[in-house]
Amino acid sequence: MASLLKQSVKLALVQLACTADKAHNLSHARSKVLEATKRGAKIVVLPECFNSPYGTKYFPQYAETLLPSPPTEAQSPTFHALSKLAKEANAYIVGGSIPELVEEEGSKGGDGKDGKKWYNTNLTFAPNGELLATHRKVHLFDIDIPGKIKFKESDVLSPGNKITLVDIPEYGKIAIAICYDIRFPELATIAARKGAFLLLYPGAFNMTTGALHWELQARARAMDNQVFVGLCSPSRDMEADYNAWGHSMIVDPNAEILEQLDEKEGIVVQELKAGRIEEVRKGIPLYTQRRFDVYPDVSEGGRFKE
Ligand SMILES: O=C(O)CCC(=O)C(=O)O
């Protein structure tokens, strides 16, 4: 059987200390990505909102315009910094996420936003500096756990509307989604059934749900789908408004944690081995045991019939 991951590859997750200074965040990200590629990484991931603080009040302030693509340097310094960096590092850069602004001319939606829409958007670049894919966070982080945490991204952000699968010719397909997206297993399952060997989630869980669900979600998505999973967080800053959980980690297709950081800044680098997915799937052959005569294949748009 052909290996889903065509050849072994080193994956790096950069758990970056993100500040309120965008220019600093970009140059700091550059030095950490170059550190990762010196260690042999060929795919390097940055965290959610790596160029800004995380919080609804910050999204409009830090947002960049990405369309029409390519944007000018003034419209999106981050687009250009990542594109240059991918070339310099000679690696695929999965650029975490940034707040994106889309202005629809002449449209005033009556929502007080004057035709402006903001998204939480990933940009992924190839080693030649070309933009390979964008993913706008599909599931917005709206939660309210009394006495613990209340967050409502949808106060400001609009949701994306697609599953993002990126075909990397030398390695195979990777899926990119953002943070809260991990809580929706259908998205992961569809990506895996469409042939992804790796699910990547730039994310910034918090002190409440991080402790409860971060590792569990990572291992669950790997276990359900028998693929590699990478979660990349900012490091924790107790002086910031939002305290990220950290604990970036890479999980293998058998749901074993290959490496996990603590809350401090750091880099995870691990080799994803070609053939490992097939080895795990041979041992526990879920892929040939599914019962699409009993329940539908969500990756084929099947509907449940009673
Ligand atoms: O799902 C969670 O508990 C946290 C999600 C989150 O922090 C985010 O989507 O940014």
Image (tube, rainbow, N blue to C red):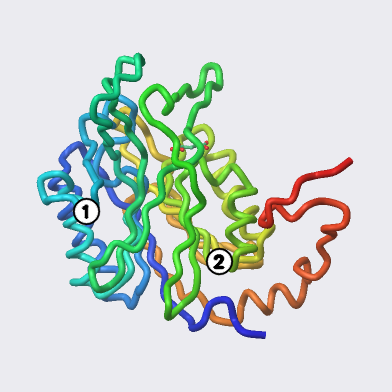
Residue sitting at x 45%, y 46%: 178
Give the label on residue 79, or none: 1
Label 2 sits on what residue type? Ala
Give neighbour class at mark 1: few <14, some 14-19, many 20+ (Cα, 10 Å).
Answer: many
Depth check: 263 or 12 in front?
Answer: 12
Q: CA distance from mark 2 to mark 1?
A: 25 Å
Is residue 29 among what the camera can see? yes
Q: Amino acid at mark 1?
A: Phe
Pick whichever, 165 or 18, lies toward us. Answer: 165
Q: Residue furthest front?
A: 106
Q: Position of residue 12 (x, y in %)?
A: 38, 66
| SS label for mark 1 | helix
Q: Position of residue 134 (x, y in %)?
A: 37, 53
| 269 displayed left or right of 66 | right
Please provide percent x and percent y for residue 230: 48, 59
Q: Which mark is residue 159?
A: none
User: Residue 214 versus residue 2: which sits nearer the camera?
Assistant: 2
Q: Quadrant of residue 155?
A: top left
Instruction: Check disc 2 and report its element: helix, strand or loop.
Output: strand
Whether 46 is drawn above or below 86: the answer is: above
| Mark 2: few/some/many CA within 10 Å (<14, 14-19, 20+) | many
Q: Residue at x 23, y 56 (%)?
A: 29
Q: Residue shown at 80%/70% (left/top)?
A: 288
Please tell me which residue is depicted at 29% across the width and 40% down the height of the picture.
100
For mark 2, what is the residue? Answer: 196
Tell me the quadrant of the picture where the C terminus can be found.
Answer: top right
- The count of marks equals 2
Q: Would residue 37 be seen by someone viewing this image from the given angle? A: no
Q: Earlier in the sequence, mark 2 or mark 1?
A: 1
Is 91 above or below relative to 67? below
Please identify the quadrant where the N terminus is shown. bottom right
